[in-house]
Image: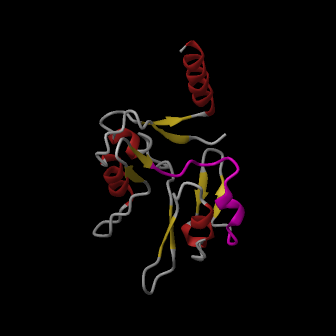
Amino acid sequence: MTRFIFASPEACIGCRTCELACALEHGAPGGKLQPRLTVLRLNTLSVPVMCHQCENAPCVAVCPSGALSMGKERVEADAGKCIGCQRCAVVCPFGAITIEIKAGELPAMVKCSLCAGRERGPACVEACPTAALSLMTEQQLVALRQKRQADTVSW
């Protein structure tokens, strides 16, 4: 199973610190800040929306160039293979993929990579002041589901 970032709407205060940390981690020096997640702020709650690293990822299935592939821990993106067709952005059920198109340049796919290669893990998780974000594995997800089910039954 892939790993993914779990966002707790109960703990999120909508400060967008995660967005900034992501943009700073992935931005080119002197370039445009492009976060790979977006904080949605509604009347009663806020929560970051990002790639869920789906096991049966529809974005991988529709990519005609092989720019998206299923890795061991996440959906891998190779922007160098991206042709800018935007199929992945259309089929993503979370709206977590964008295609950046600049004049005179090839299209660039932008999606969460779980900060691959970063020793301390995803920058957004590390920066969140309320610990609303956490990196989850299959075992942690199963444990969380069982706890919530038990809490619901005993309620």
In the orientation shown, which residue stands out farthest toward the bottom? 104
Where is the N terminus found, in terms of image quarters?
A: top right
Dominant SS in magenta:
loop
Report the side of 114 relative to 25 (left or right): right
The residue lying at 63 percent from left, 42 percent from top is 2
Span of residues in magenta: 49-65
Q: Quadrant of residue 124?
A: top left
Q: Quadrant of residue 77?
A: bottom right
Answer above or below: position of 42 versus 61: above
Q: Quadrant of residue 153?
A: top right
The residue lying at 42 percent from left, 85 percent from top is 103
Coloring scheme used: secondary structure
Report the side of 91 relative to 23 (left or right): right
Point out residue 23 in the picture as x, y percentages from the top left corner. 35, 57
In the orientation shown, which residue stands out farthest toward the top? 154
Point out residue 106 in the picture as x, y percentages from the top left corner. 51, 80
Point out residue 3 in the picture as x, y percentages from the top left corner. 58, 40
Answer above or below: position of 98 versus 119: below
The residue lying at 57 percent from left, 65 percent from top is 89
Numbered marks: total? 0
Magenta span contains residue 130: no
Report the side of 118 relative to 32 (left or right): right
Point out residue 14 in the picture as x, y percentages from the top left corner. 32, 45
The residue lying at 49 percent from left, 37 percent from top is 135
